[in-house]
Amino acid sequence: MGRARHVGWVAAGLVLGAGACYCVYKLTRGQRQGGRGLRLRPSRSAEDLTDGSYDDILNVDQLQKLLYLLESTDDPIIIERALVTLGNNAAFSANQVIGIPIIGSKINNSNYSIKEKALNALNNLSVNVENQVKIKVYINQVCKDVLSGPLDSAVQLAGLRLLTNMTVTNDHQHMLNSYITDLFHVLLTGNGSTKVQVLKLLVNLSENPAMAEGLLGAQVDSSFLSLYDSHVAKEILLRVLTLFQNINNCFKKEGSLAIQPTFPKGSLFFLLYGEECAQKMRALVDHHDADVKEKVTVLPKF
């Protein structure tokens, strides 16, 4: 019993110290590294990890201890700290191959803070394309969390960031087909930060000709066109213009609008290629921002 308790405290100490050692690593690496590569030292004790002089990334043995702790403890504070440490270390190529299923299981946790930290860790891991093959099994769950969770919450933003990373390539974009209409709803109801993140995701999808039909067929409220008003924040306006531009480019690749499928009324197609949108595009030609004007000039001549 005593030995088991000792092991538990050592592992807990590892979590408490890992976040601090990562921060020290970031602050001191430039001064102390002197051009050498990242060093992986043998496993250290919890006391060594909490020492401010420790500036190395976690090695495989230390990561395994964290994963074991993550799998075995019910303490929400320790779980959060372990996820933060694993997420921070996921950015380093040497630590890309870690327990994705263990981390992924935490996105179903009822504790929203734990869910957010798990999504952030998966997001960092998803930068590695090989890891995306393992992470894609969580896409449906992440989509449901993004769409059903609290609007503008940290969990929703973390989920959107993960989906954005997972759609940088075309490999897994088709998995979002059934969620496109709901993503537009989040776009229109969310705050500025949420709007930007949803648009990053939709722009990724719009670059893939195979996703054009799903995007244009989505039922979208007419208030979407208000995003093309001249007073809209530049970071939002440029992205909705890019979305339109990408979709239009997909049509050019296909030949012409005439050969495209018939889209239902109320769909994005009728909004983008309708008279109200045309009026907004004509107004944006005189926008004060040069980047916005440049985007408008490559769109269809209305």
Image (spheres, helix red, strand yellow):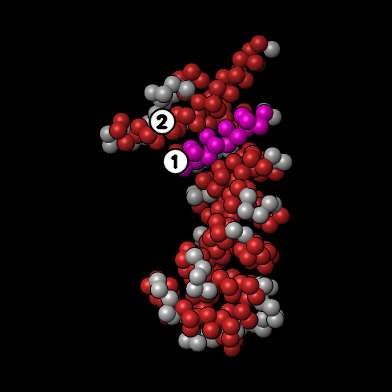
Quadrant position of residue 272: bottom right
Q: Which mark is residue 290?
A: none
Question: Which residue matches tag 2?
Answer: 24
Q: Secondary structure at mark 1?
A: loop
Q: Residues within 10 Å of mark 2 (few under 14, many from 20)?
A: some
The residue shown at (47%, 29%) is: 20
Q: Is residue 256 magenta?
A: no
Side (left or right) of 31 relative to 75: left
Residues drawn in magenta: 75-91
Q: Is residue 298 above or below residue 195?
A: below
Quadrant position of residue 30: top left
* Residue 92 at x, y percent in the picture: 44, 40
Q: Nearer the viewer, residue 84 or 281?
A: 281
The residue shown at (64%, 40%) is: 113
Q: Amino acid at mark 1?
A: Phe
Q: Amino acid at mark 2?
A: Val
Quadrant position of residue 41: top left
Q: Is residue 84 magenta?
A: yes
Question: Which residue matches tag 1?
Answer: 92
* Residue 23 at x, y percent in the picture: 44, 33
Q: Nearer the viewer, residue 279 or 97?
A: 279
User: From this viewpoint, is residue 243 visible?
Assistant: no
Which quadrant would the N terminus be assigned to in this image?
Answer: top right
Q: How many marks?
A: 2
